[in-house]
Image (cartoon, rainbow, N blue to C red):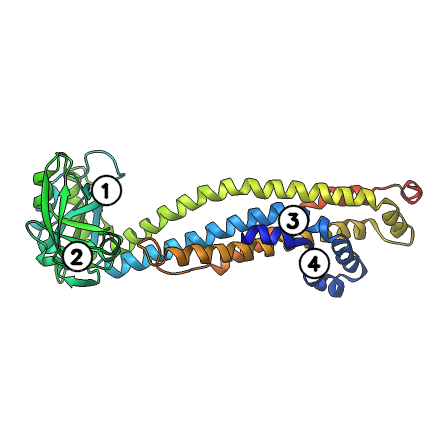
Amino acid sequence: VVLVGAVVSGPGISKRASSLIAAPLSRFRGVTGDLARQNAMRSPRRTARTATALIVGVGVVTLFTVFGSSLVASVDQTVAGSLRADFVVGASGFTGPGLDPQLVQQLKALDEVEAAASFSNGAVRIGGVGVSLIAVETATLSRLVEPEVIQGSLGSVTGNAIAVSEALAKEKDWTFGERVEVAFGDGSELSMRIGAIYTRAEILGDLVMPTDVWELQSTQPSVRQILVLTAARTSPAEARTAINTVGSKLNAPKAQTRTEFIEEAAGEVRETMSIIYVLLALSVVIAVMGITNTISLSVHERRREIGLLRAVGQLRGQTRAMIRWEGAVISIFGTVLGMLIGLVAAWGLVSALSDGPELGSFSASVGQLGLILAIGGIVGMAAGVRPACRASRLDLLDAINS
């Protein structure tokens, strides 16, 4: 709705916006800059129509940029705020056999390790709906992960008990102490008590189940991660060496520090966003072509005017600069308007998801937004290069007589 409204109202705001954007040109670029400003203001409908593709492209790029920044910030906050373990040993990828179940026992036996717990991923059905879970040794969990527990305690989640996130409890209308029917992949069912409700932590997901219960019911239990807390007076280097020595014998990946693990989690989000940026770059390329075509058409319509300017003393370089700056004004107009639309859309999306587990807060990178704005101006200058060269090479007599 915001995008459609901006496109429809574009002609009404383009003249005033172009005047404001190009105001520095009149002051610092003299007559050439003032002519570029007037040319950009001359046809508000054409300016708005030309900038439409750029408005859409930049708007979507800004939306995903801000959404990605908010997602990365949320991952940083949720993982960093709840993870107490010093090292994480994680399986490479989400498929395959996972880590050797013996690894966690061997790590516990090390003098350099105070506590260790294995994490297994799985899924069950509750009320006919699939729910992802984390199976973990709950007796040790509170020493390695520290989410905000609202009711109960993670250490008391033993036997036929589970812990659920506050978001899932609200979604299912569950209460602390309530029993729910849990269906497993092997066809069996268990009546399990909700022994704890916690504020969702990224590393725990929405449902936590004791490892011993999961292993009895699961057809293919597999360890995905092992969290390790080092012993007192043990240096990180010594602990890492000891953990990696044991892990190498069981083909486990190298241990990551807490900081490295958080960076990797955020890096996965950034990699996904980079793929989206490549696809969205196509819309910017299309926008450049549109600006180039419009400026070329404008130059053709103003052949006589350009010829007269040249006749009264305008240099070729000034003609080229005038056309290039005109393209820059149109481009910056589309970039700024698209960025504003993207920010509004991103704020709405993040606000809608902020009560759920996905996002915690709105986060916009000033550096990234500044880069988008700079690229928008450069795009306009680049789009005007070819028409500017053609305009500067016009034959004066032919142009004046046209």
Q: Position of residue 151 (x, y in %)?
A: 16, 63
Closer to the eye: label 3 or 1:
1
Q: Are marks 2 and 1 in contact (CB under 8 Å)?
A: no
In this view, the residue in front, 234 or 285, is: 285
Q: Residues within 10 Å of mark 3 (few under 14, many from 20)?
A: many
Residue holding disc 4: 18
Kindly report the distance in space between the C-alpha atoms of the residues bearing marks 4 and 2. 57 Å
Res 51 label = 3
Q: Position of residue 266 (x, y in %)?
A: 35, 51
Q: Mark 4 vs mark 2: which is more N-terminal?
A: 4
Res 129 label = 1
Q: Amino acid at mark 2?
A: Leu
Q: Is residue 60 left or right of residue 13?
A: left
Q: Is residue 70 above or below residue 243?
A: below
Q: Amino acid at mark 1?
A: Val
Q: Quadrant of the C terminus?
A: top right
Residue 131, picture quadrant = top left
Kindly report the distance in space between the C-alpha atoms of the residues bearing marks 3 and 1. 47 Å
Res 385 label = none
Residue at image x 49%, y 44%? 277
Q: Mark 2 vs mark 3: which is more N-terminal?
A: 3
Q: Amino acid at mark 3?
A: Ala
Q: Amino acid at mark 4?
A: Ser
Residue holding disc 2: 144
